[in-house]
Structures are given as C-alpha cells and as structure tokens.
Image (cartoon, rainbow, N blue to C red):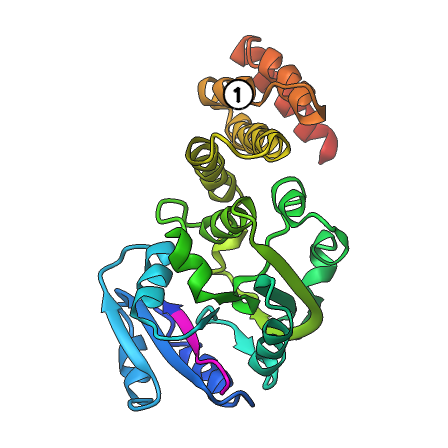
C-alpha cells in the first residue's frame, strides 16, 4: 500500500493565495494524502476560505506563534508516514508527490528529498530556483551549500520521513523565523540523515512583496541564532561540521554588521564585525571593517557622502 503523505500548509493572512494552493494539492496524481492547513492567527478571510474545503482539508487555528512552531504543530497533528510542506503562496505540479514518494520508496537510505521549482510573479515565469542557487544542483555537500552559499532547499519542495523526525525529537526552529527551515535541514545532516534532490521543477514559487526571505537583515540575524544553537546542541559534531558552522557564524556576523554600518550605527556594527574576525576571507574583511569603525563618526560620514556623490 502507498504510504500516507501528510501535507502541511502553514498560513498567515493568505486569503489571496490559499485557495489556489489547496487546489494544487487536490490535483495531485498521488491520492493517499491528508491536507492540514495550520493557520497562524490570520486576521483576513483565510480560515473562511479553508472551510470551503471541509471534508478534504483539516484546519488548525493557532495564535500568532511563528512559521517554525506552526509547521511543528502541523507535524504533531499529522498521521502520515511521510510529511510534505507547502507554503500557502506556492503551488505544486500535479505529479510532484508521486515522483518524490516513488523516489523515497526506491531509496530507503534517504530521509529527505527536495526538488527544483519554477519561480513566478504576476508577469509570468522568472526561471528556476536552482538557477538562482546553482550550488543546490551542483554541490555534493548540501551543508556547505546552505551555510556558505546561502542555498537552502525550498521548503515547498521537501518531503521527509516522519520516523526520522520522531526518533530524533527534532523539528523546525521556533525562534528563527527566517532560518527555521535551514536549521532543520542542517540538523538532519548533523544526525546522519541522507538528503537527496530531484532536478525537476516540481513546485512553483510565487514571488511577491511579502516574501520573508527578502529581508536581508533579519535573515542573517536569524542565522546567528541557528548556528549558535547547533554548535551548543552538538558539541561532539565532526570537526568539519563545527568548522563549517563557525564559518557561517562569522559570515552572518559580518552581514549583520554590514547592515548596521550602512545605517552608521557604529557600536553594533563594531561588535558584529569583531565577532566576524577569523582566518578566512570574510574574517579578514570583518577585521578591516572593524578597524574602520574606530575612526571618528564625522570622518566616516564625510567619506560616505563623498562616495554617494561620486555614484550619483
């Protein structure tokens, strides 16, 4: 018998897209599935739209607790041997689940599979997700791609084995809302889980002004939390992985410092640049910027104005 797949759809004020999203799951050629929409305290008509699918979709309503905790609540409420995730503004191709379930059945050593996706907006297709993050398709080391290349598998393409999550007691990070998926995928890797990819565009990622991944500052601020937590949780991780996580910590520190530098907030910038100093390119760059923050702010403002004037 085909395994039951639990499809977890987190939603928050998703009335513009949730109906089309659900329809893309109902059109799947793979029929043994359950659909769980976990609404994170929407203040628009999202719950009413989900109620249109009563009998086909289960709705869980929560207070506003964040996307990581929302996905975890969906997992806890699910019954499937496999768990798939779909953001409420994204869509699936009709054979998406069928192809990924077949892959996992044929590759029992793998606990997670992801795929490419087509990006689109109101004007039409914007190309493939792997084209934007080529290391996802070319790198043999998914952890390095995530940490050093900022290339995170698109959660709307991911299918996981439920027993791996249950056996290790892991889930999405609940305090890192722009890096909760990366945290889980890195944790799977740290625990020896095999992660595979399919090079087909099995999902469609909608681009719009509300995409949380577009918040540069917050994305790297949340990465700081993830790297620190993983280093603390896995002190006996292989040396290569601890080295990689520390490199990611320096990189994220520099990026956050860079944002404060752009705002001329020299105190926070100096502290983040200091934490980014290390024996690699980003560490050297962090040292140079840290040294610059020691200059008088008036001189730095004059330099900034001069540079702005030249660009104009």
**Residue 105 at what x, y percent from top left?**
59, 75
- Provide the residue designation for mark 1: 275
The part of the image, by quadrant, that contains residue 99 is bottom right
Q: Which residues are magenta?
A: 1-9
Above or below: residue 68 compared with residue 234: below
In terms of image quadrants, where is residue 242? top right
**Where is residue 5 shown, x and y percent of the image?**
45, 78
Q: Is residue 8 magenta?
A: yes
Q: Residue at x 50, y 28 (%)?
A: 260
Identify which residue, 56 or 178, lies in the foreground: 56
Q: In the rendering, at what x and y percent does residue 167 appear?
A: 40, 56
Which residue corresponds to the image point at 26% horizontal and 72% vertical from the top-left?
A: 60
Tell me, yes or no, whether the highlighted magenta stretch contains residue 293.
Answer: no
> Is 256 located above or below residue 136 in the figure?
above
Q: Up-down: is 263 above or below 19? A: above
Q: Residue at x 66, y 43 (%)?
A: 144
Q: Quadrant of the C terminus?
A: top right
Residue 295 relative to residue 23: left or right: right
Describe the element under mark 1 as helix, strand or loop: helix
Q: Which percent across, then down, holds residue 125?
A: 68, 74
Q: Residues within 10 Å of mark 1 (few under 14, many from 20)?
A: some
- Horizontally, residue 75 falls left or right of residue 281, namely left
Of residues 132 and 173, the one drawn nearer to the viewer in this rendering: 173
């Amino acid at each position: 018998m085909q395994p039951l797949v639990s499809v977890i759809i987190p939603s928050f004020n998703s009335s513009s897209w949730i109906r089309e999203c659900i329809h893309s799951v109902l059109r799947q050629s793979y029929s043994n599935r359950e659909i769980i929409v976990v609404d994170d305290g929407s203040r628009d008509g999202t719950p009413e739209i989900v109620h249109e699918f009563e009998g086909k979709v289960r709705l869980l309503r929560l207070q506003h607790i964040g996307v990581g905790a929302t996905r975890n609540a969906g997992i806890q409420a699910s019954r499937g041997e496999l768990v798939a995730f779909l953001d409420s503004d994204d869509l699936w191709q009709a054979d998406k689940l069928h192809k990924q379930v077949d892959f996992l059945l044929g590759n029992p050593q793998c606990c997670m599979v992801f795929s490419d996706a087509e990006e689109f907006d109101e004007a039409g297709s914007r190309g493939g997700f792997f084209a934007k993050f080529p290391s996802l398709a070319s790198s043999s080391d998914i952890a390095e791609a995530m940490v050093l290349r900022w290339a995170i598998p698109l959660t709307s393409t991911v299918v996981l084995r439920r027993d791996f999550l249950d056996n290790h007691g892991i889930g999405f990070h609940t305090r890192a809302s722009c890096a909760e998926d990366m945290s889980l995928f890195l944790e799977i890797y740290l625990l020896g889980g095999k992660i595979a990819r399919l090079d087909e565009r099995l999902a469609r990622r909608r681009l719009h002004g509300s995409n949380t991944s577009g918040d540069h500052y917050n994305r790297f601020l949340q990465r700081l939390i993830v790297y620190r937590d993983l280093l603390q949780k896995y002190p006996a991780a292989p040396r290569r992985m601890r080295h990689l996580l520390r490199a990611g910590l320096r990189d994220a520190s520099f990026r956050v410092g860079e944002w404060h530098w752009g705002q001329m907030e020299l105190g926070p910038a100096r502290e983040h640049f200091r934490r980014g100093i290390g024996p690699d390119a980003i560490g050297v760059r962090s040292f140079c910027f840290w040294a610059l923050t020691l200059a008088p702010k008036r001189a730095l403002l004059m330099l900034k104005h001069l540079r702005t004037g030249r660009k104009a």
